[in-house]
Amino acid sequence: QVQLVESGGGLVQPGGSLRLSCAASGGTFSRLAMGWFRQAPGKEREFVAGISRGGLSSDYAESVKGRFTISRDNAKNTVYLQMNSLKPEDTAVYYCAADLNRRRGTTDLNDYNYWGQGTQVTVSS
């Protein structure tokens, strides 16, 4: 079974930056398409970014395009989410997820087989 552990969350001021990491274990990382999702209080979990197995393709939610960057280091079994120009509406619990069956990180949370426990990101003055 694949295990995912997020880290790097915290409190940041509007306009600031934060870099999230997700470390994977228990599987062959290079066979996993990876994604980041977030869930704000009272809202549904939503897609943030996805990346293909080899890291050559990525996809972003419209709300984060130009501000967030997803990347992966298969040698370190880790996927990252660099978040710049953070806004209060980015406040949420951020989750990483792994998909065994597809090459690209898709937007549908139901495509993913494994999930981390999440890390809190709070953007506030």
Image: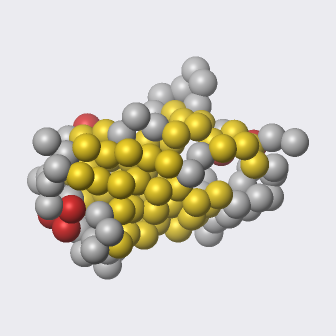
Question: As drawn, is 29 to the left or to the right of 35?
Answer: left
* Residue pictured at 14% horizontal, 61% vertical: 28
Q: How is the image coloured?
A: secondary structure
Find residue 37 and report its horizontal and vertical position in percent: 44, 44
Q: From this viewpoint, which residue is outermost toward the right?
A: 125
**Is 36 or 120 nearer to us in this picture?**
120
Q: Quadrant of residue 51?
A: bottom left
* Residue pictured at 65% horizontal, 58% vertical: 18
Q: Quadrant of the N terminus?
A: top left
Q: Relative to residue 5, is residue 76 depicted above or below?
A: below
Q: Relative to residue 50, is residue 4 depicted above or below?
A: above
Count of all numbered marks drawn on residues in the image: 0
Q: From this viewpoint, which residue is outermost toward the bottom?
A: 56
* Residue pictured at 58% horizontal, 37% vertical: 120
Q: Is residue 26 visible?
A: yes
**Is 91 or 26 nearer to us in this picture?**
26
Q: Is residue 62 visible?
A: no
Find residue 24 and report its horizontal and vertical position in percent: 29, 53
* Residue pictured at 20% horizontal, 41% vertical: 113
**Is 97 or 110 nearer to us in this picture?**
97
Find residue 44 and report its horizontal and vertical position in percent: 48, 28
Q: Relative to residue 50, is residue 99 depicted above or below?
A: above
Q: Quadrant of the C terminus?
A: top right
Find residue 110 and report its horizontal and vertical position in percent: 25, 37
